[in-house]
Amino acid sequence: MSYAVKGVFWIGVYLLLILAPLAILLIEPVPPGNGFWWDVSLALGFAGTAMMGILFLQTARFRRASAPFGIDIIYYFHRQIALIALFFILAHPLILLILKPQLVELFKPGVAPGHLWGAVVSTLALVALVVTSIWRKQLNLDYDLWRVLHAVLAVVALGLAIWHVLGVGHYVDTSWRKQLWGTFSLSWLLLLVYVRLMKPWAQLRHPYRVAEVKQERADSWSLTIEPDGHDGLRFEPGQFAWLTLGNSPFALKEHPFSFSGSAEKVPTLTFTIKELGDFSSTIKHVKPRQIAYIDGPYGAFSPDRMDATGFVLIAGGIGIAPMMSMLRTFADRKEQRPLKLLYAYNTWERLTFREELQELEQQLNLEIIWLLKDPPPGWQGESGLITGDLLQRRLPLTDPEQSYLICGPVKMIELTEKLLHQSGVPLARIHSELFDMV
Ligand SMILES: Cc1cc2nc3c(=O)[nH]c(=O)nc-3n(C[C@H](O)[C@H](O)[C@H](O)COP(=O)(O)OP(=O)(O)OC[C@H]3O[C@@H](n4cnc5c(N)ncnc54)[C@H](O)[C@@H]3O)c2cc1C
């Protein structure tokens, strides 16, 4: 089955999961309504709660469901759906209060039933979830701390919303409706058990051991790991995995890294990691035989999924890691199709994989365009930033069957996508990988 067909299938499953809890409420006998806007408000509350539940599903990293889209698209979708769910949840009480302002009286201490306060706390938790996710960096929230906070707030928001739904009881007044809605709710929370317990448990049973840690140019380290007592995994060049080192997988201290080694050399896995923060700065101290855990492979950023006459790879900085996996795999497969690599970095000295790339240029039908921001004296090659003129001059932009893969800093990706598109490259031929999820 093609990825497009699989994608349509999973979108269908998604819509079914959102609509099923609502449809159940409409099975006869339906309780008498309270007027159009009153019912719209209730529908928004139910829909918002169902969408909150589905948010858990999106981050459960089901490989089959995420494969047609790529996990970055799923996370993007997750953020957009969370905003819509928040809008629905906020609109629900607002409409009720506009219709019946005297409902405010309910919030007097000792008057309001517990589940009503539950709804208030649930809404506040959802607002906090959205605010801390959109402005995490501006709020200086450490990534690991944010992840824990995100999980706690999500459980609080959904758990209390369900309590409110069942507590009010309108539309879920018969016992079978209560049970069905309750079962749906329970299955959303069971997803948490799957993500936090079952997945780490599966990783624990499939450990890896560090085979080598090698220094590369520009404060980067290549970490090679091998499966310990199992067959390991297969991946497509360009994909990535979540890596846990020196912690139990239950600690959820995992970080995503692209595979940089050849997909033909499995079960050996290599990642190339640039020193950027707390975790990436510890790689240089990792010793051989140290235990590691992997959750993957993920991602749709792979030439293996593209029917193309050739590939143009555009890398900036450590964005070379997935490209290295592609080129090494191409070399192992004796790939004949024409390849171009536009590799942008600050200086010649810091070009990670410089020597190996020069060798690959000899082995493959590959041309490398080195683009230096700060070139050495006497540099004959390209310099400065990526421009439309550079792309027109150096890349074969005219072949409509060629695929373009971009990986690097966010600004570079956005600019390059825009320039390629302005130069007439169809959007369907442009693919990019962001190293920044939240
Ligand atoms: C799909 C993907 C592929 C990647 N491939 C590579 C690669 O091949 N080589 C490479 O050097 N880097 C890669 N990264 C980036 C790498 O994951 C982060 O640089 C690393 O997690 C930073 O962690 P830190 O603790 O060292 O730095 P910190 O200073 O703690 O974090 C720096 C920033 O990295 C991001 N980050 C931190 N922890 C995580 C996490 N657990 N999950 C997601 N993002 C996080 C956050 O935006 C954070 O603000 C990739 C990221 C993604 C999303």
Image (cartoon, rainbow, N blue to C red):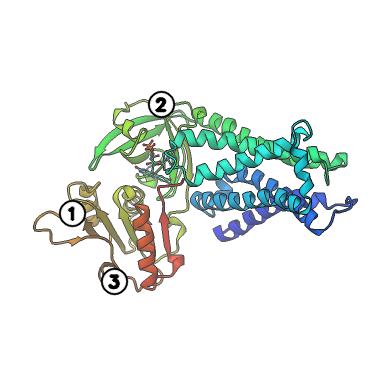
Read off the residue under disc 1. 374
Res 183 seen here = no
Distance, label 3 to label 1, CA atoms, is 22 Å
CB atoms of marks 2 and 1 within 8 Å: no
The quadrant where residue 128 appears: top right
Badge 3: residue crowd in 10 Å (few <14, some 14–19, many ≥20): some
- Horizontal side of residue 54 vs 383, given as left or right: right
Counting from the top left corner in percent of width and height, residue 216 is at 24, 40
Read off the residue under disc 2. 246
Q: Three-letter amino acid code at disc 2? A: Gly
- Horizontal side of residue 113 vs 333, given as left or right: right
Q: Quadrant of the N terminus?
A: bottom right
Of residues 112 and 146, which is closer to you in this image? 112
Distance, label 3 to label 2, CA atoms, is 47 Å
- Horizontal side of residue 372 vs 404, given as left or right: left
Of residues 10 and 165, which is closer to you in this image? 165
Read off the residue under disc 3. 392
Circle 3: element type = helix
**Residue at (51% x, 42% y) in the render:** 132
Q: Nearer the viewer, mark 3 or mark 1?
A: 1
Of residues 247 and 294, which is closer to you in this image? 247
Counting from the top left corner in percent of width and height, residue 111 is at 79, 34
CB atoms of marks 3 and 1 within 8 Å: no
Res 18 seen here = yes
Distance, label 2 to label 1, CA atoms, is 38 Å
Q: Three-letter amino acid code at disc 1? A: Asp
N-terminal of the two: label 2 or label 1? 2
